[in-house]
Image: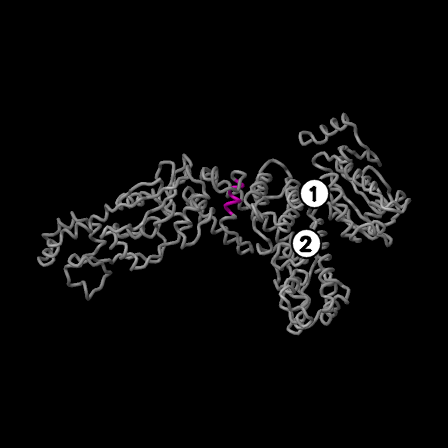
Amino acid sequence: MHDVRSISDLLSQIGRGEILLPEFQRGYVWKRSQVRGLVQSLYRKHPTGHLLVWRTYMPSKVRLVEARNGDAAGDGHSLLLLDGQQRLTTLYALFTGDAPPFYEGEKLFFDLYFNVQTEEFRFWQKTLMQKNPAWIGVHDFLREELHGLLQRLPELEPEHREVLQQNLARLGRLDQIRNYTYTVDRVSGDEFGVDEVVEIFNRINSKGTPLKKADLALAHVCSIWPEAREEMRTFQATMAERGFKMDFDFFLRCLAGVAKGSIRLEGTFLKIPATELQQAWNRMRPAFEHLVAVLRRDACIGDDGDLPTASVLVPATVFLAREGGQFPSDSVKQRFIRWIYLAGLWARYSGAAETKLQQDVALVAGSDPDPTHELEEAILRERGRIALEASDLAEVRISSSAAAMARITARARGARDWFVGLRIYDEARGTSNGSERHYVFSLPVLKKAGFDSAADRKIINELANRAFLARKAPREVRSSPPSEYLPKVDADQPGALRAQSIPLDRELWHPERYRDFLSVRRQLLARAINEYIESWRPGAGDGVDTEEYVRRLMREGESETVEFKSSLRWDRVRERTNRDLEKGVIKTVAGFLNSESGGTLLIGVDDNGEPVGIDVDYKTLRKGDRDGFQLHLQQIIARDLGRLVATHLTVTFHVIDGHDICQVSTEAGDRPVYAKHGNSDVFYLRTGPATQPLSVRETVTYVGRRFGATG
């Protein structure tokens, strides 16, 4: 849709505040030559382009006070100038001798002159113009208009009057530029979505800075709430000082989520009254401040650079705003930190980011007192698992999300700089003490050992060959193999290597064993990351995963919340693999999930509470170690109970009297779980020290009482 407007009409609209300048527009940057060129074109009636405005909804009962000092049109909409700012600013100054209300820039030009005899436009030159009556000031003339000049003619010097009288036609032509018309293309929020408006602008403005959806949203917010720009900028600067340099897009997504439970910056967002936006901002701001404090103090996340994407903080911010700026309990806080880790690690917001962020914000904006279960389930549905595997770290770069999680894990384990002894993270201040990413095996060392092909670069630069230090390592270290400098590190900084998951087998510190070093370190890193993330599951820090706790359970025997299994799949009587034994594990886990209190399953403990270990199970697996065992256990649980139950389980290992014991801690589920046995689904429930299947009638009764509508 378009209108045809004269310059005079357009300037009147600007003066009344009907045409406003969006916040994303740059200030006035035209040079003298561009100003003169525009006026020449107008005088000669040459084309000077179209104008583009965005007609966006202004909520009723809200009077637009100003947008860059403008006033409302008062018709329920505002007109935001997308293309044509430089021209209209020039014209406003030309005709009024003043800057337009929305002006921001370094300099305007008010000294353009016109020669009525030669029709030449020039900026003031004293030697050329001072004593030449043919030169008149364009600004003065246009403000006075031709009619005003004619009234003053008798008062002028004869020579001056004669020159003007002889060139009245040219003066009339100059005066008529106020009637020059522009086609004003108008894109309306009622006809075009925000995405389309962005596309239109970027097509027209192909040589300028690309417009983003958030730019338009900010322009709209500022058009109905003028103080928003300064409010956001002030808060932005405050949070940047604390290490979180969030852009306006982040704040707008949070604002939309708090106001409407949606992060989409279009549709209903563009119809939110200013008062509601202000109220949402007043709830969002302390919520984000609290979240930042929690991340720095508790989660070893010192700044936004520790996150793969700031989007992982949007759902938590919206939830906190809903809860008055504080987590309602420590357990909910722990779960949100755990979810932030998982969302970052598994790149929750890569690909279809807006859709997934919208889904997650809708969850946290609802009434669920703890939406983290469903948030975590969304990751599990998408990725199939939440536990990291060593293979996930093969050829992964230091810039990856896994590397960010490895750095956080090292900080949490008290990692220190290997050469100066300084902890790499200051928990008291919530800040990093440095961000040096050290090569364990340096490039010169590996090149000398024959790792110099293009393919080798991938394994040289991968995460498993990097460590996090506070300072750059000494020069001599950077040219030495680990076999020469790590022994000293191990002696001078006890525990520093273990904190960063460095293999302690010194044979692996030689360049010729580099590939073996990578293989082992990937396993150690994956295990450390998994254990750290699991430690944030509520209850994990209450002693339930310690050796002493497991020994106590073994002494007390099986109960309504504890069961023992001597193995996962090895039949100790027949001395062969027996997959039917796996069904017993599935049955127990299902029973605990369906109970009201959850429970603990110990695998590798016989009926008498004696440790017998799971080494026999290792031998039946392709990958015969803890990682292989855990992977197989997770696979059969996902197969028979569904992948989503993994969010309610914690798997840990212990060495009891020389035997590996697997502990499966199960929370009470938030929905009924059915075990798949062939073509049948069976509902199991833990009753006393046994797990029993319920009949259909018993299941319906119990599920209705225990789970209610969820069932």
Q: Residue furthest bottom?
A: 476
Q: In the image, 547: left or right of 46?
A: right
Residue 204 x, y percent position in the rendering = 39, 49
Tell me the residue that label 1 is attached to: 647
At mark 2, the secondary structure is: helix
Residue 501 x, y percent position in the rendering = 72, 60
Q: Residue furthest top?
A: 697
Q: Nearer the viewer, residue 263 or 103?
A: 263
Q: Is residue 598 magenta?
A: no
Give the amino acid at mark 2: Asp
Residue 658 placement: quadrant = bottom right
The label nearer to you, 1 versus 2, is: 2
Give the amino acid at mark 1: Thr
Q: Nearer the viewer, residue 642 or 708?
A: 642
The 10 Å Cα crowd at callout 2, few under 14, some 14 to 19, many 20 or more, is: few
Residue 392: assigned label: 2
Look at the numbered discs 1 and 2 and tell me whether their residues touch, using CB distance below 8 Å: no
Q: In the image, 194: left or right of 151?
A: right
Does residue 355 appear in this view? yes
The magenta segment is: 251-258
Residue 164 placement: quadrant = bottom left
What is the magenta segment's predominant secondary structure?
A: helix
Residue at (48, 49) in percent of width and height: 232
At mark 1, the secondary structure is: helix
Does residue 290 appear in this view? no
Marks 1/2: CA–CA distance: 20 Å
Q: Nearer the viewer, residue 124 or 479?
A: 479
Residue 517 x, y percent position in the rendering = 73, 63
Q: In the image, 192: left or right of 628?
A: left
